[in-house]
Image: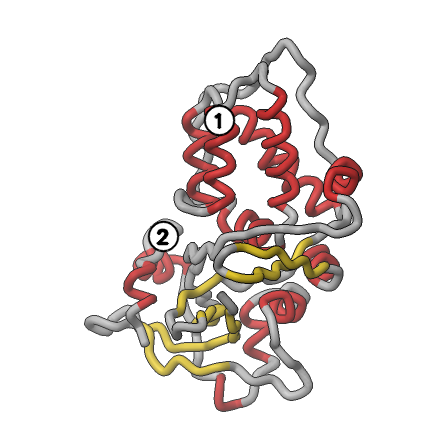
Amino acid sequence: MAKHYDLVGSVYDKYARGNKYREEEIIKIPGVTFNSLEDIDKFTAGLSGSYDLSSRLDDKYQGKNTFSIRVTNNDKSFYYKSIIYNNPDLVKIASSLKKNTSYRVSGPRTVKMYLGNDELFIDAWSDVQNKILRSKVIEEDREWLYNVFGENSRYTTLINRYIKGDPFDSETDIILLDLEQDFREYEVFRKYLTNKDKLKNKSTVSNVRVTSSKVPVKTSLGVIEEKLGDDISYVSLDDEEDDYEPDDFAFLSPEERVEAYGEGNIDIEEHRRRR
């Protein structure tokens, strides 16, 4: 299913009854074209924050105090994603994605993948990989993965296959390799960046060793390319997981922010109904 991405601004009124999000409008910036999610990320990740974004907008947008990315499907259904600011490494990653097309019963599916080894990506995968390895024995790590990637996503389905796999079966090691490959899909990687801090790891175990009679497979881009060959066929599910959080800037004090949103939480369903 094709998706259309728009940078949108709206007015959040915490005192309003019912729909607190009003006057949603697609943001247009002279000389800047947003044709994809990575186009928006390349622009916003180069900004210091929402105040910086607001300062670059025309006067007609100055009343907006909330910005997000609206994702619209072919069937006109939509959901929202958080904006990412102040991340120069992400600008480089978003600028070097490779398109890959796979074919399923439902038709062709094209996804964007990152095949490089930027430090941001390497650190991100290391974090995810460690939690995947520990998730076999630590429930908190398993919950963290579910919260980051969504319980019903394709990626989480693959994680569950790994968790349930026999540690002495080579197929389990192959699943771990597949998990790194899938993590290179831009939208999956981006979910990590936007959702990784939503659930703090409550595990009281600081050092955990996952033991096996075999040395775990060391996943790497080189192994992936060797396995896939020159023509990469990549499949992804339409993961319509809403990772949006409202983006208030200077208009709200820290106390007002807590009152409006709670301690880091947001009423997503309310935001979905705002239009």
Q: Amino acid at mark 1?
A: Ile
Residue at 66% x, 81% y is 32
Which residue is located at x 40 percent, y 45 percent? 152
Residue 106 at x, y percent in the picture: 48, 59
Disc on res. 106 = none
- Residue 98 picture quarter: bottom right
Can residue 87 be seen at all in this image of the molecule? no
Near mark 1 (Cα within 10 A), the count class, few <14, some 14-19 or many ≥20, is many
Amino acid type at mark 2 = Asn
Identify residue for label 1: 163
In the picture, which quadrant includes the C terminus?
bottom left
> Is 35 drawn above or below residue 253 in the view shown?
below
Residue mark closest to the camera, 1 vs 2: 1
Distance, label 1 to label 2, CA atoms, is 29 Å
Q: Residue at x 78, y 45 (%)?
A: 229
Sequence-wise, the earlier of marks 1 and 2 is 1
Residue 156 appears left or right of 267: right
* Image location (x, y in percent) of residue 123: 68, 40
How packed is label 2: few (under 14 Cα within 10 Å), some, or many (20 or more)?
few
Q: How is the image coloured?
A: secondary structure
Would residue 229 be found to the left or right of residue 146 on screen?
right
**Number of callouts in the render?**
2
Q: Which residue is mark 2?
A: 265
